Amino acid sequence: MLCYRAAIMKIAFIGTHGVGKTTLCFDLAARLKRLDLNVDIVREVARNCPLPINQETTLDAQAWILHSQIAHEIAASARYGAVICDRSVLDNYAYMVHQVGRRKEYDALVESWVTSYDGLFKVPIIHPPTFDGTRDLSTTFQGEIDALIDELVEVFSARCHELDPHHREAWIDEVLIAMGLPTAPPQIDLFGLEEE
């Protein structure tokens, strides 16, 4: 089994580029810290890839991204009780599949590693991507990756919660509820008063 686990909880936001996963990671981390959890964020590794990404990516580039993602998750899980991932192996794999098709060896890796997440949350497309120096701006490419992610969720029978596109403001609460966590920190009775 490939899955190394020490963290008590590993959550990943999955989805195509430009849907707001990074913002959600920071929002969720803030909420988990209020619940007194020791939290780390595994940031999107593709931004540090020394090889071409987006529509110009290669098999080598996507292999680098997949293995880097796993390495970062292992390191974070060894040190923190809660790990939030800005992407997972599954949606990173979608970019490889888009460019070069599925690969038997990577199918096996992704199928095994996807079970290491306690929660996968699919972020829907609401707006086209905006330029940030890295992100591809093609809405066609954005949509193709989104569809491939949905296909791979089915292929690998991944347990995935789809966030409601009509209630963006409630997404973090959706995640907390799905993970069995309170949506607000417990209230401390500062004055020693008990409710009757």
Image (cartoon, rainbow, N blue to C red):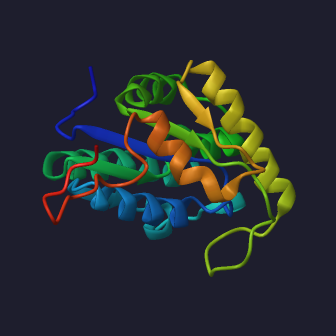
Q: Residue 65: image x %, image y %?
A: 45, 52
Q: Residue 186: image x %, image y %?
A: 28, 52
Q: How many marks?
A: 0
Q: Residue 118: image x %, image y %?
A: 38, 32
Indicate left or right for 45 with 172 as reference.
left
Indicate left or right for 156 with 89 as reference.
right
Of the pair 132 and 34, the residue shown nearer to us: 34
Which part of the image, by quadrant, shows the N terminus? top left
| Residue 17 against residue 92 in the figure, above or below | below
Q: Quadrant of residue 115?
A: top left
| Residue 46 against residue 101 in the figure, above or below | below
Q: Residue at x 39, y 23 (%)?
A: 112
Q: Residue at x 39, y 54 (%)?
A: 184
Can residue 154 be seen here? The reply is: yes
Can residue 44 be seen here? The reply is: no
| Residue 148 against residue 129 in the figure, above or below | above
Residue furthest to the right in view is 140
Q: Quadrant of residue 19?
A: bottom right
Q: Residue at x 59, y 33 (%)?
A: 161
Which part of the image, by quadrant, shows the C terminus? top left
Q: Residue at x 80, y 64 (%)?
A: 127
Of the pair 182 and 82, the residue shown nearer to us: 182
Of the pair 117 and 161, the residue shown nearer to us: 161
Q: Residue 145: image x %, image y %?
A: 72, 46
Of the pair 29 and 35, the residue shown nearer to us: 35
